[in-house]
Every structure is written in C-alpha cells, then in structure tokens.
Image: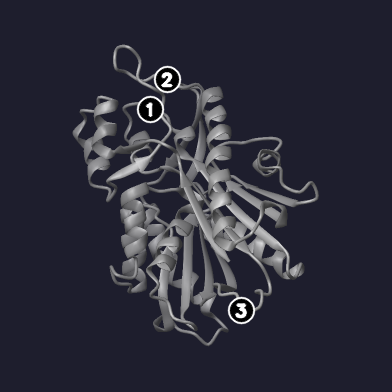
Amino acid sequence: MALGTATSDRCYTQQEMLEMYNIEDRRIRSVFINGGIKKRYLTLPDALADGTRRTETQADLLRKHREQALDMGARALKACLLEAGLRLAELRYICCVTSTGLLTPGLSALMCRELDLPRDCARLDVVGMGCNAGLNGLAAVSNWAQAHPGEVAVMLCAEVCSAAYVFDSSMESAVVNSLFGDGAAAVAVRYPPATGEAGLGVFKFSSHLIPEAIGAMRFNWDETHGKFNFFLDRDVPYVIGANAELAIDNLLDGTGLRRSNIAHWVLHSGGKKVIDSVRVNLGLTKHDVRHTMSVLSEYGNLSSGSFLFSMQRLLAEGVANPGDHGICMTMGPGSTIETALVQW
C-alpha cells in the first residue's frame, strides 16, 4: 500500500569520516573512497575537547540501538501510514526487523508503547538475520495479511548500523565501517486491496541458502574491545554472484516468466562489488540497478531496509506500468539470497 523511510539526523561524507578518525593508512582510505559511497547517515559520539571521538562501550552501543531504532522506526512508520491514508489505530500487525542490537522486550513491543498502538496489535520480531531479513519479514507480513482479509499489517526495518562499529586499525573493521549506515523503512500491506486502491502485489517468495558460506557474514565477540563486531569475508561478492542465477531461476520456476519478462529490479545495496557481481551474473544493465546504486551512494548499506529505499525511488519515478513484473533481491548472512516476485 505505501512505503516510508527515515534516517538518523547526521550525515557524513566518506572524506569527513577519514578526517574524523585520523585515518592515514592508504589501504583503508582506498576502501572508504572507492566503494561507490559518497555519504552516509550515522549516529556517532560527539568530538572531545582534543578533537578525538569517545570510545563507546557495548552498553553505549546497545543504548544507541534502542534509542535510534525507536526514533527512526517511528518516523518511518508514521510516514508510511500517512502515505497510505491510515491511522495508527488501524494497524493490526507489526513485524520489526533488525540486526544491530538485541532487545528484550523486543523492538515491536517498545514501538507499540512508543506510538500507543492498539493493545491487541499482533507482533513479530525478526532479529539477527542480517541484510536479507527485509524479505523474510515481508513474507511473514504478507502471509498474515492474507490470513486476515482487510486488516492492515506493517513491516518495519530499523537498522542502527553505527551501533555495531568497532574502530581500530584493522582492514576487517575498515571494510565494515566504510560500508554501513543508519536507516529505517516501513511498508504497509493489506489483502485484498480496497476498491479502487492502487498498489504493488507480492506474488511469490523464494529463499536460497548457501550453507558452505555460513561464516562469510557474521557477528563475533571481540575480546580486545569488549564488544560485538561484524565480519565480512572478502569473497562475499563472488559467492553471492555465483548463486544469483539459481536463486532467480527458483523464484521464476512455475510462474511462466523468464528473466527477460522482468521489467524492474530492486536489489539490496550490499556494496559496489556485490551489486556488480550480481548484475554481471544476471545479465542486468546499469540502468536496471540505478536505484540500488544511488541508495548505496547516498546512504551506504542500510542492511534489511536497503531494498525498500530503492523501491521507494522506483515508485517515485513513475515508470512502472500496470501489469509490469519486478523482482526484489536481498542478500545476507547464512549466506542467503532472498527473492520476491512483484507485479504492478
């Protein structure tokens, strides 16, 4: 029915990040400058008197995750419902997706209290599934909506990636710190559509797990820093690219559609190398991934909500015609490729 997005308040260019943390290592500077990212929205500690930044503890990071996920999430959800012409009181189901912090009670309960949602609103928290989880959450929301005709369901992705940053001189940390940004995205779903209501239909979901690469994307406990850090294997782009065709073939199997019938592609902004690898393996053009690349450039990798930022741009463009088919694709830990077939 509608989409809404939000980010943290402060935006930093990649060059500003390098200067802020006094990064002189040429290899690390290259990772920041040559990753296809111009700027990102991040929640970083204020500068101290000497110009350096305070080192955040794991408790600080968890507090940041909670505060920013609630703030960004509430703004994204309100924007979504406003676009759909709905009131908060009409919301019957909320699925909150996040991987940047563990909360109990979960983000869904906290969001219900924050926005004074109906006390009988059904809830689901999808935690720790990573960048692919937006489509996992959307599948759950779509299934709930189909089982409850006429009721409004919402998926909310709230990722405070700066709550999972470890700052040191290692290349592993540099890759993560150069890539991710803070953002939230919400999507409202109802089945069947109301009379005369235009919308985007979701027709099929498909999952493709790559168990031999299960450790390629993961959270580790860093004993030195006393906090969690995120690890990305350098072979991730090639693993994802090599499996992209099979994932799409599985999605289209039995639909009567071929890749050539797909008019619009919405990919997760996982990183320049990941996007290029998927594009080459699927035979897509740069035009096909224009919104994916522009979101990467202006926001970085927003984890589970990235594809919704790209979808929002596609919808605003107004180029899709009734009957057009599209594919959404997200990739993340597992390693996993999630896909969805949509139609206007």
Q: Position of residue 149 (x, y in %)?
A: 75, 70
How many angstroms separate mark 1 from mark 3 (CA)?
52 Å
* Mark 3: secondary structure: loop
How many angstroms separate mark 1 from mark 2 (CA)?
8 Å
Q: Name the residue under label 1.
A: 167
Within-10-Å neighbours for mark 1: few <14, some 14–19, many 20+: some
Q: In the orientation shown, which residue stands out farthest toward the bottom?
A: 256
Amino acid type of disc 1?
Phe
Q: Where is residue 205 in the image (x, y as percent from the top left)?
A: 58, 69
Cβ atoms at labels 1 and 2 below 8 Å apart: yes
Task: Decide: is 254 above or below 56.
Answer: below
The answer to whether residue 131 shows anywhere in this view is no
Between residues 173 and 327, which one lies in front from this camera angle?
327
User: Which one is earlier in the sequence, the residue at label 1 or at label 3?
Assistant: 1
The answer to whether residue 342 shows anywhere in this view is yes
Between residues 101 and 48, which one lies in front from this camera angle?
48
How many angstroms separate mark 2 from mark 3 (CA)?
54 Å
Amino acid type of disc 2?
Thr
Q: Where is residue 193 in the image (x, y as percent from the top left)?
A: 65, 74
- Mark 1 or mark 3, whichever is nearer to me: 3
Q: Position of residue 112 (x, y in %)?
A: 70, 43
User: Which one is earlier in the sequence, the residue at label 2 or at label 3?
Assistant: 2
Q: Name the residue under label 3.
A: 196
Within-10-Å neighbours for mark 3: few <14, some 14–19, many 20+: few
- For residue 323, which numbered disc appears in the image? none
* Mark 1: secondary structure: loop
Cβ atoms at labels 2 and 3 below 8 Å apart: no
Task: Decide: is 61 above or below 254.
Answer: above
